[in-house]
Amino acid sequence: MKIVEILKKWIKAIFSKPLTILKSIIFNILNKNKNLKRLEICNNCDKKINIKFVGDVCDVCGCILDNKTRIKDEHCDLGKW
Ligand code: SF4
């Protein structure tokens, strides 16, 4: 089931880069650093999936796209941005 795979990726990310995750959530809440260029690339990517009550998520890394794309040092795992 897709959500189980995504949850595993979230747990891994929480342990490997907790500050980045926290920063991305805070940026989203404060609506800071929105990156429309990156979001547009994700919106046209076949790896974008939508999870009910969560929003658009990357099937490759498991990140919530509206959060991930706000972090300057983050990158697309497929090299699209
Ligand atoms: S981060 Fe990369 S692979 Fe994931 S949805 Fe965006 S463009 Fe696609």
Image (tube, rainbow, N blue to C red):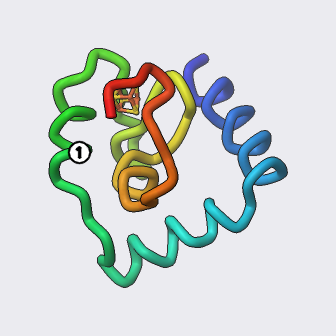
Q: Position of residue 45 (x, y in %)?
A: 25, 22
Q: Position of residue 9 (x, y in %)?
A: 69, 34
Mark 1, ligand 1, within 8 Å: the answer is: no
Q: Is residue 23 above or below residue 1?
A: below
Q: Nearer the viewer, residue 74 or 8?
A: 74
Q: Quadrant of ligand 1?
A: top left
Left or right of residue 72: residue 11: right
* Residue 34, quarter of picture: bottom left
Q: Position of residue 46 (x, y in %)?
A: 28, 15
Left or right of residue 9: residue 3: left
Left or right of residue 18: residue 55: left
Q: Is residue 67 above or below residue 13?
A: below
Mark 1 closeness class: few <14, some 14–19, many ≥20 residues within 10 Å: some
Residue at image coords 42%, 38%: 57
- Say which residue label 1 marks: 39
Specify the farthest residue to the right. Answer: 15
Specify the farthest residue to the bottom. Answer: 30
Residue at image coords 72%, 45%: 13
Residue at image coords 56%, 30%: 61
**Which image quarter is the C terminus in?**
top left
Kindly identify the amino acid type of the residue bearing the numbered disc 1: Leu
Helix, strand or loop for disc 1: helix
* Residue 44, quarter of picture: top left
Residue at image coords 60%, 17%: 1
Q: Is residue 10 above or below residue 4?
A: below
Tally the marks. Answer: 1
